[in-house]
Image (spheres, rainbow, N blue to C red):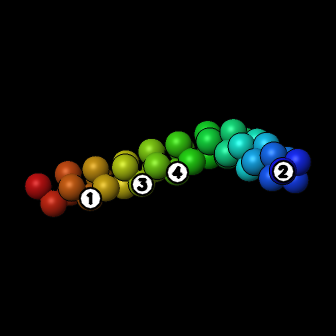
């Protein structure tokens, strides 16, 4: 149980550290899709 708890803390820390990177990747993908859509109009 203790190992599971430590593993969960490690995963949550990793998610917190990479959250901003995930948001920036999602924003980049959204911008690329929006620019492709505008270019097709």
- Please report contact status of discs 4 and 3: CB closer than 8 Å, yes or no: yes
Front position in the image: 5 or 24 = 5
Q: Residue at x 67, y 45 (%)?
A: 15
Whether residue 7 is visible: no
Task: Judge from the rendering whether residue 41 lies leftward or rightward of residue 10; answer left or right.
Answer: left
Mark 4 or mark 1, whichever is nearer to me:
4
- In x, y percent, where is residue 24? 54, 44
SS state under label 1: helix
Label 2 to label 1, Cα distance in Å?
A: 49 Å
Q: Residue at x 42, y 54 (%)?
A: 29
Query: Up-down: is 36 above or below 16?
Result: below
Mark 2 or mark 3, whichever is nearer to me:
2
Task: Judge from the rendering whether residue 40 lies leftward or rightward of residue 16; answer left or right.
Answer: left
Label 4 to label 3, Cα distance in Å?
A: 6 Å
Mark 2 or mark 1, whichever is nearer to me:
2
Whichever of callouts 3 and 1 sits on the residue coming sooner in the sequence is 3
Image quadrant assignment for residue 16: top right
Q: Residue furthest right?
A: 2
Image quadrant assignment for residue 33: bottom left
Q: Residue furthest left?
A: 41
SS state under label 4: helix
Mark 4 or mark 2, whichever is nearer to me:
2
Whether residue 11 is visible: yes
SS state under label 3: helix
Q: Which residue is mark 1?
A: 36
Q: Which residue is mark 3?
A: 29
- In x, y percent, where is residue 13? 76, 42
Q: Which residue is mark 4?
A: 25
Label 4 to label 2, Cα distance in Å?
A: 35 Å
Q: Which disc is residue 1 wearing?
A: 2
Label 3 to label 1, Cα distance in Å?
A: 11 Å
């Amino acid at each position: 149980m203790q190992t599971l708890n430590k593993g969960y803390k490690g995963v949550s820390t990793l998610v917190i550290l990479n959250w901003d990177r995930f948001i920036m990747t999602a924003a980049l993908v959204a911008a690329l899709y929006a620019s492709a859509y505008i270019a097709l109009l």
